Image (cartoon, rainbow, N blue to C red):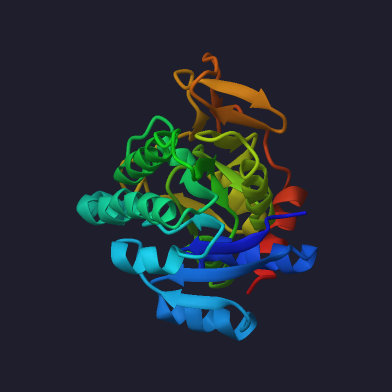
């Protein structure tokens, strides 16, 4: 059960890395982990909880260091990325240096080291991309899909927001509510996809056995920002601030222009699929209050 062998996680000191390690330890995966990331603070914090892991301080922009770190590993999970949309819009060259050229470095490092499989972490922002961040992640997906003849199997997962991940608005909303202040939301009717950290890990496990070049897309549930604010602080009032930059009212996980097949419980974007499917946060099933709070409890138990 779970992944096996020597596993390296780029950006591994973030929320997803913690979720993967916690799942692996709980389920007894037959593997070892190397955490490759550029934040010495997050690595130090992670080392306190998981001292038995191997840690390498490095950036995916540094091709030479990445090649050395990847050597000897069977699987690479590529989670390192610039993610904050306003900063990516303001500094697109920095965004592309990490998210596109960094992904190119990951591909080369995996191929040079004869890694068995590499799984890239993408986002719903890559579908019908309108932001620098979304465009950079779409480029990463295309780069991975283009490696069809590579001995290393490259595949991706594409999903929405992980509850209480780094940079989450939830602690800020709680603080605002405790101080009797309104909760700022960009747009009350805006919908976003949500999943628990453990669900993201299970998606990666499923992608690890899917066909080369595929993008595994889960059938996620969604909430409006107003619904989410009401769950976090039921008695607080909200105030609309407008979008921070170029953002969608509703997110997309699938576009009708993408070739997909059904692979229960997911969709797979592949070269020989069919089109005509779309999956948006506006029409997706709504998360219940109970389900969202359960996701939040799980995510915050990592802290």
Q: Is residue 284 above or below residue 51?
A: above
Tell how many labels.
0
Q: Residue at point 36% right, 57% down?
A: 82
Where residue 148 appears, as percent x and y from the top left, is 45, 33
Q: Nearer the viewer, residue 149 or 85?
A: 149
Q: Tell me if residue 301 comes above or below residue 160 in the rendering.
A: below
- Residue 30 at what x, y percent from top left? 73, 64
| In this picture, residue 97 sits left or right of residue 34 | left
Q: Residue at x 62, y 36 (%)?
A: 210
Instruction: Name the quadrant of the C terminus.
Output: bottom right
- Relative placement, left or right, of 234 versus 242 is right
Observer able to see residue 13: no
**Percent of width and height locating residue 192:** 54, 41
Residue sitting at x 43%, y 59%: 80
Q: Residue at x 39, y 56 (%)?
A: 109
Could you tell me residue 20's position as x and y percent? 63, 62
Near-viewer residue (77 or 300): 77
Q: Which quadrant of the structure image shows residue 57? A: bottom left
Residue 240 seen by the camera: yes
Q: Nearer the viewer, residue 58 or 45?
A: 58
Nearest the viewer among 62 and 296 is 62
The N terminus: image quadrant: bottom right
Side (left or right) of 209 relative to 108: right
């Amino acid at each position: 059960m779970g992944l096996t062998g020597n596993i390296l996680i780029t950006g591994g000191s973030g929320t997803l890395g913690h979720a993967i390690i916690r799942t692996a330890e709980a389920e007894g995966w037959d593997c070892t982990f190397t955490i490759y990331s550029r934040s010495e603070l997050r690595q130090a914090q992670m080392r306190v909880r998981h001292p038995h892991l191997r840690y390498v301080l490095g950036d995916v922009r540094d091709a030479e260091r990445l090649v050395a770190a990847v050597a000897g590993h069977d699987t690479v999970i590529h989670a390192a990325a610039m993610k904050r949309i306003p900063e990516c819009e303001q500094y697109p060259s920095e965004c592309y240096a990490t998210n596109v050229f960094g992904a190119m470095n990951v591909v080369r490092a995996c191929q040079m080291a004869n890694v068995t499989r590499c799984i890239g972490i993408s986002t719903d922002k890559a579908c019908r991309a309108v932001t620098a961040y979304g465009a950079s992640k779409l480029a990463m997906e295309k780069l991975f899909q283009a490696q069809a003849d590579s001995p290393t199997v490259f595949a991706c997962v594409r999903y929405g927001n992980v509850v209480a991940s780094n940079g989450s608005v939830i602690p800020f909303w709680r603080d605002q509510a405790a101080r009797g202040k309104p909760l700022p939301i960009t747009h009350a009717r805006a919908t976003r996809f949500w999943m628990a950290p453990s669900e993201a890990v299970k998606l990666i496990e499923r992608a690890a056995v899917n066909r080369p070049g595929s993008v595994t897309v889960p059938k996620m549930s969604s909430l409006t920002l107003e619904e989410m604010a009401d769950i976090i602080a039921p008695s607080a009032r909200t105030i609309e601030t407008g979008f921070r930059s170029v953002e969608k009212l509703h997110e997309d996980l699938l576009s009708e222009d993408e070739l997909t097949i059904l692979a229960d419980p997911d969709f797979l974007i592949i070269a020989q699929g069919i089109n005509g499917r779309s999956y948006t946060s506006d029409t997706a099933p709504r998360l219940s209050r109970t389900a969202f709070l359960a996701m939040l409890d799980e995510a915050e138990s990592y802290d």
